[in-house]
Image (cartoon, rainbow, N blue to C red):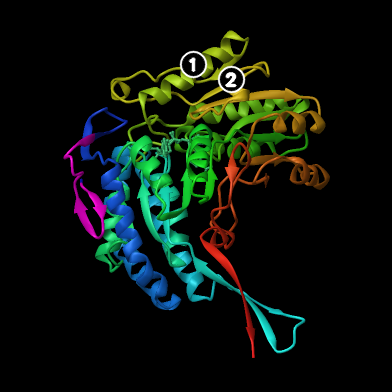
Amino acid sequence: MQMFVNGARVDAASGATMEVHNPASGEVVDRVPKADADDTRRAIEAAAAAFPAWAKLPPAKRAHVLLRAAASARAHLDEVAQLLTSEQGKPIRDSKIEAQRCVENIEIYAGLVLGGEPSGRHVPLPAQNAIGLVVRRPLGVVGAIIPWNFPLTLLANKIAPAMAVGNTVVAKPASTTPLATLRIAELLHDGGLPAGVLNVVTGPGGVVGEEIIRHPLVRKIGFTGETGTGKQVAKSAADELKHVTLELGGSDAAIVCADADLDLAAKNIAIGRFFNAGQACLAIKRVYVMDEVADALIDKVAARAKRLKLGSGTDASAQMGPLHTDKQRAEIESQLADAVERGGTIVAGGQRPAGEQFGQGYYFEPTVVVDVPAEARVWTEETFGPLLPIMRVKDLDEAIERANASEYGLGSSIFTRDMTAAQRAIDELEAGYTWVNAVQIAHDELPFGGTKHSGYGKEHGTEVLDYYTEQKSVVIAS
Ligand code: NAD
């Protein structure tokens, strides 16, 4: 597949390409251009050229263009989902939901603009015969840099609000997951999105991403990825004082109190840990359970982990696909070995699954490990795969203290029937999100973003519009 720049499919000027592999088989699915800094500059210049006309469109007209473009993509969701499964590895039904959510996001932000968002303010001023206004302006060209775990969701989180309020975009998917993104851009264009409003450049992060971050015409960077990369992004973007949103790594804690509904807790913990083969930023990566109910909870979570059906993403009955790469699987195996060496006990999974159908893919069983000391890597690092440590604690004080003893602050959960305990979790857990007895999914309606080393800025909700517009104060005297 070619890149998508200024409304056309293009190759890298050098002709260089990179392979895209299927994580279930290791086979080459396709090749995409390996762009360099000059290719990236051409895409940025196309976005800058498209900006004035796009920004000047009356908001309702812009919204209708986006709704028509989204309808064009909506007609091809199955095809997009198949591309996503072939490059990412996730089960096809999850890919369908992701493709649909991507299009829905464009519709949601077009709808918000139709409804008058983002609104400004009229401010009464003390001076006679003068009124104050706060108006919003789009920023200009926005760079969207995306990881491989939810390529379409994380693309939509950026491009949907950005385009709706009048910005133009240069997006860079992860090198291993460019295909569904390229196809979505093309479908949006086929549906009437003007050339240059959304450009997709494929290539290495250190080249294409770095050029997007450093180029003076790009006024904002929406970045999702690892904390280490995010820090580098913030440093590079500082030279041009760019707006930056950083959605980074997480190690979300879940607390299970003695009075909790243990079946509900076990179900939501299993979903929260094993969805997308555990490769999610918002994912339950540590569990702290009160002593009195620890054995019962561990049994229930382990039983759910053992029941999950592994399989290739194209197997309609598979609940969990392979890990995205061999490196990703090796990392999980190394974190598990560390936990076991330090005294941990595996109560579910712990192996690569046996069977010919798993031979070529990067599969790993859903794994639960207990009695792991607090210094182990599963507690101190991000665990980006299907591996869950569960720790027994004596009370809520200890649970909250341990939950907060992490450099990350993305999500958090508590399972309890006691509103006082829930209130303490809401007030005291250092995270951008707290779920109470709820399944840990991010809702489009609520702002989402981390604290501490999980980043800054918000996506989703109406709040994201603050991150893709500038506010300008106006005084009108008569
Ligand atoms: P990554 O940081 O390796 O890569 C993310 C993107 O940045 C890719 O497109 C990559 O090519 C690009 N990149 C790499 N180096 C760059 C550089 N120097 N300059 C500019 N761009 C560069 O992350 P990953 O391994 O693809 O994704 C997994 C990580 O993403 C995990 O840590 C996960 O928690 C995090 N994540 C966070 C969220 C969130 O919303 N907070 C969501 C999903 C994933």
> Position of 392 compared to 47: left or right?
right
Q: Is residue 351 above or below residue 170?
A: above
* Identity of the residue drawn at 43% across and 50% down: 153
Mark count: 2
Circle on res. 334: 1
Above or below, comparing residue 469 to residue 41 in the picture: below
**Is tag 2's residue or tag 1's residue first in the polypeptide sequence?**
1
- Quadrant (top left/top right/bottom left/bottom right) for the N terminus: top left
Question: What is the crowding at mark 2: few (fewer than 14 residues within 10 Å), some, or many (at least 20)?
Answer: some
> Which residue occupies 39% across, 77% down?
61
Q: Which residues are magenta?
A: 2-18
Secondary structure under badge 1? Answer: helix
Q: Could you classify mark 1 by the number of other residues whose Cα lies within 10 Å: few (under 14), some (14-19), or many (20 or more)?
A: few
Nearest the camera: 475 or 353? 475
Which quadrant would the C terminus be assigned to in this image? bottom right
Q: Quadrant of ligand 1?
A: top left
Q: Are marks 2 and 1 in contact (CB under 8 Å)?
A: yes
Q: Position of residue 434 (x, y in %)?
A: 67, 45
